[in-house]
Image (cartoon, rainbow, N blue to C red):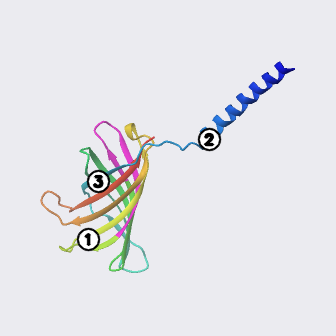
Amino acid sequence: MSKLRSMARVQAFFMVLAAALFLGLMAAPVVCAAPVTVQVKVVMTGPKPDLLPAGDDTNHTVGMATRTGQAVFSDGRKAKYSNVYLMDLFKGQFAKIWGYTKMAFPDGSWLFFKWDASFAGRDKANNPTFAGSGELQKGTGKYQGIKGTVKFKNKMLPATKEFPNGRTEAQATIIYTLP
C-alpha cells in the first residue's frame, strides 16, 4: 500500500508541476521586438490633382492625384516614394486629404501605409502646410509583418526649374515593430 501511495504522490507532484508550468507560460508576457523610431525626410512631386466640382458650391471640389519622390531615413536608408491620394477641398474653409503611400527599398522590400491629413495653415513664406497621421498596413522582405504608425507635416513649395509642378517636402516620424 505504501508503494501505491508513493507512486500516487509522485504522479500528483508531476501533475502539479505540469499545471504550474502551463499556467506560468500562459501568464508570461509576449515578447515583441522593441519599437523602432525613425525620422524620414521626403521630397515628392507630381502632376496637379484632377479636380471636379463637388456640386454644392463653386469653391468645393474633390480631387485625386499621385506623387513620387525620394525618402531618406535618419538611419541612412533610402527608398523610392510613391503615393496616391484623394482630397476634399473647400477653398477658404477646409482641405482634407487621405491616401496610400509605398516606400520601396533598393533590396526589393517595401512598406505601405494609409494616411489622413488636414490643412494646418501657412508657413512664413505663405506656403500651405498639412499635418497628418497614418498606420502601417503591410510590408515585404525585411518589413514583412510590420506594424506601426506614421505622423507627418508637409509643406507645399512653388514650381521651380527642377520641379515644374512644384514639390512637397515632408518630415515624418515612423514608429514600428517587426515580428
The foreground one among 145 and 17 is: 17
Task: Give SS at disc 3.
Answer: strand
Going by the numbered disc 2, the residue's amino acid type is Met
**Mark drawn on residue 26:** 2
Residue located farthest toward the left when viewing the structure as drawn: 161
Q: CA distance from mark 1 to mark 2?
A: 52 Å
Going by the numbered disc 3, the residue's amino acid type is Gln
Relative image position of residue 142 (x, y in whole percent): 38, 38
In front of the other: label 1 or label 3? Answer: 3
Q: Is residue 82 above or below residue 90?
A: above
| Comes first in the chain, label 2 or label 3 | 2
In front of the other: label 1 or label 2? Answer: 2
- Residue at the disc numbered 1: 128
**Image check: 13 left or right of 149?**
right
The range drawn in magenta is: 101-118
Relative image position of residue 98 (x, y in whole percent): 40, 62
Going by the numbered disc 1, the residue's amino acid type is Pro
| Comes first in the chain, label 1 or label 2 | 2
Seen at 25% across and 55% down, the residue is 41
Q: Is residue 31 above or below residue 155?
A: above
Seen at 28% across and 53% down, the residue is 40
Main SS, magenta region, reads: strand
Q: CA distance from mark 1 to mark 3?
A: 22 Å
Disc 1 and disc 2 in contact, CB within 8 angstroms: no
Q: Quadrant of the C terminus?
A: top left
**Mark drawn on residue 39:** 3
Relative image position of residue 61 (x, y in whole percent): 37, 73
Q: CA distance from mark 2 to mark 3?
A: 37 Å
